[in-house]
Amino acid sequence: MHKYLHICKKSSNFAAQNVENKVMEREMTLHQAKMNLLRVVDRIKTVDEVQAIQKVLANYYAQKVNDEMDRLWDNGTINEQIIEQWGQEHMRTPYRYAQ
């Protein structure tokens, strides 16, 4: 039994290290991506360039939203009835007035 516990502990340590390595790899990749973006932003010289980059980013994220909506539609998570319900929902934040 003692040998089994030792193997389980070793396996657990390996899994934790593996997760930690994956997190570090992801952080390094994100850091590199951010640095690349900063290099691009550093080259911006005009308002037109700023607006063009903003448009590219807006289009990129709009496409991601469209793709996700298509995925949700295809797997049945959303449909016409649900979208109609969204149109009827009252989504305002309730305000608490000072008394």
Image: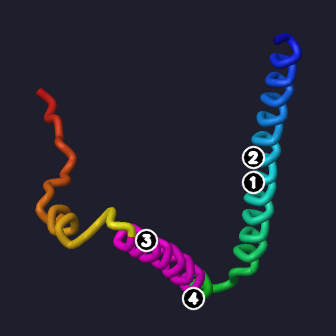
**Which quarter of the picture shows residue 10?**
top right
What label sits on residue 48 in the rendered view?
4
Q: Are marks 2 and 1 in contact (CB under 8 Å)?
A: yes
- Residue 15, image x and y in percent? 78, 36
Q: CA distance from mark 1 to mark 3?
A: 25 Å
Residue at (54%, 78%) from the top-left corner?
A: 60
Q: Are marks 4 and 2 in contact (CB under 8 Å)?
A: no
Main SS of the magenta part reads helix
Q: Which residue is mark 3?
A: 71
Residue at (33%, 62%) from the top-left corner?
A: 77
Chain part drawn in magenta: 51-74
Q: Which residue is mark 2?
A: 23
Residue at (57%, 86%) from the top-left corner?
A: 52
Whichever of callouts 1 and 3 sits on the residue coming sooner in the sequence is 1
The amino acid at mark 2 is Val
- Residue 99, image x and y in percent? 11, 26
